[in-house]
Image: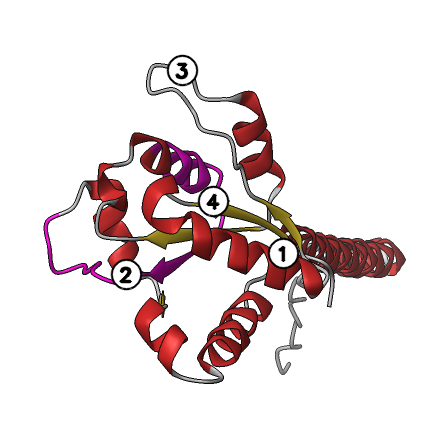
């Protein structure tokens, strides 16, 4: 399996702990993870390092807590990821529900298969996090990377080009053989000449004397 580049989108206050947990687990499994841990001023422009992280990633994991839809930065990150056709994996935290009214960029995620992370169960149940990360890696394993997609497109285009070349060669050979056949036909067969109708000859009969 090729190493996948992961971008984690999250709101700091409710999701930083989970974001760091996911980052640590994925890095331990040879994933390249982008997790911005610096606070971004509300009036700041969209940071270039965030843009670069989204542009080069294969998958975006977005952590959704109850207050996340109010985060302007999360919405901006999702908007850019959507514009770049990046696969998005929502992780639903405690208290978040798609049944509530959300901004369009968040509401549209309801159509995507998501994972649930319950922090209380994680504390109470042994093995809960192991099961969660197993499911997360399973989902990641089913998402095609851009390199694989580009390779598949390239192979498909190559096959189409080869078929076009073969079709063109068959067309040329077929037309060529037809032309050769036509040139070998005698011209007298191709042209019609009127046949001479023999003129009847009068036969004189001798009158009896």
**Residue 183 higher or lower than 74, as above or below:** below
Q: Nearer the viewer, mark 1 or mark 3?
A: 3
Left or right: residue 116 compared with residue 25: left
Instruction: Examine the rendering and report whether any part of residue 191 can be seen.
Output: no
Q: Give how far across and how far down residue 208 sits, in percent.
A: 62, 83
Q: Quadrant of residue 57?
A: top right
Q: Give how far across and how far down residue 33 sits, in percent.
A: 62, 49
**Residue underneath mark 3:** 44
Quadrant assignment for the C terminus: bottom right
**Residue 183 higher or lower than 127, as above or below:** above
**Residue underneath mark 4:** 85
Would you say the residues marked 1 and 3 are in contact, meaning their CB atoms lie under 8 Å apart? Answer: no
Instruction: Examine the rendering and report whether any part of residue 45 can be seen.
Output: yes
**Residue underneath mark 1:** 145
Q: CA distance from mark 1 to mark 2?
A: 21 Å
Q: CA distance from mark 2 to mark 4?
A: 15 Å
**Residue underneath mark 2:** 111
């Amino acid at each position: 399996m090729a190493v996948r580049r992961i971008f984690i989108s999250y709101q700091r206050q409710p999701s930083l702990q989970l974001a760091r947990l996911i980052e640590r687990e994925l890095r331990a499994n040879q994933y390249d993870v982008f997790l911005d841990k610096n606070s971004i001023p509300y009036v700041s422009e969209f940071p270039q390092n965030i843009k670069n992280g989204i542009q080069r990633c294969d998958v975006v994991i977005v952590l959704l807590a109850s207050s996340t839809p109010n985060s302007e930065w999360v919405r901006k990150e999702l908007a850019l990821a959507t514009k770049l056709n990046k696969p998005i994996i929502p992780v639903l935290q405690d208290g978040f529900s798609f049944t509530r009214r959300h901004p369009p960029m968040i509401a549209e995620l309801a159509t995507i298969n998501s994972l649930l992370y319950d922090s209380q169960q994680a504390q109470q149940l042994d093995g809960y996090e192991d099961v969660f990360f197993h499911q997360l890696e399973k989902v990641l394993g089913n998402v095609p990377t851009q390199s694989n997609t580009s390779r598949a497109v390239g192979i498909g285009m190559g096959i189409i080009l080869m078929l076009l070349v073969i079709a063109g060669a068959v067309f040329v050979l077929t037309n060529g053989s037809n032309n050769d056949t036509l040139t070998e036909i005698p011209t007298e067969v191709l042209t019609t000449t009127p046949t001479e109708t023999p003129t009847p000859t009068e036969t004189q009969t001798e009158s009896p004397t």
